[in-house]
Image (spheres, rainbow, N blue to C red):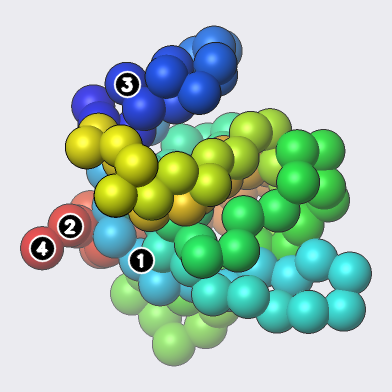
Amino acid sequence: MQETRAAEQIGFVDKRNSQRFECWSSLQFHHNTAWERGIATDISDTGIHIVTLHPLEEGSKVKVCFDEPGTFGSRTLVGKVRWKSELSPFESKNWIAPSMGIEFTSKLPVDASAFAKQNKPQ
């Protein structure tokens, strides 16, 4: 997977303990007093990869708000930034944009595989 190779290039050691599912879903995340936008490119029961122009610092607490598959509602999860990369496509051929990895500190309210199926990459 491209994200894994690029993460290894920036010194990230893959310590995932649950299966990741590729997805493509617009979302919002909140830190301190500001909301930012991003795109989820993979999700698991324990975390999410978010492509964003404004990745947060490692260790930052964050609220992630995304649409719940098959409904008109949205869900907000609490998490912590485990790693970030500010690489752009111009700096690395294996990386699509600046991004960050979030570890959920609250339980994912939907099944990760169902979320991914509803939000398949086009």
Residue positioned 23% across, 27% down in the render: 1
- Sequence-wise, which precedes: disc 1 or disc 4? 1
Which marked residue is nearer to the observer: mark 3 or mark 2? 3
Residue 7 in sight here: yes
Instruction: Decide which of 3, 42 is in the foreground and name it.
Output: 3
Labels 3 and 2: the sequence-earlier one: 3
Residue 121, label in figure: 2
Mark 2 element type? loop
Amino acid marked by disc 4: Gln
Extreme residue toward the front, this view = 91
Q: Are marks 3 and 1 in contact (CB under 8 Å)?
A: no
Residue with the mark numbered 4:
122
Residue 78 in view of the camera: no
Residues marked 2 and 4 touching at CB (< 8 Å):
yes
* Amino acid type at image mark 1: Ser
Looking at the picture, tell me which residue is in the foreground, 7 or 79: 7
Give the CA distance from mark 3 to mark 2. Answer: 19 Å
Q: Residues within 10 Å of mark 2 (few under 14, many from 20)?
A: few
Q: Secondary structure at mark 4?
A: loop
Residue drawn 54% across and 75% down?
A: 37
Residue at image coords 83%, 51%: 61
Where residue 58 appears, as percent x and y from the top left, is 75, 38
Q: Which residue corresponds to mark 1?
A: 25
Q: Any mark on residue 42, and which?
A: none
The tag earlier along the polypeptide, 4 or 3, is 3
Disc 1 from disc 4: Cα separation: 10 Å
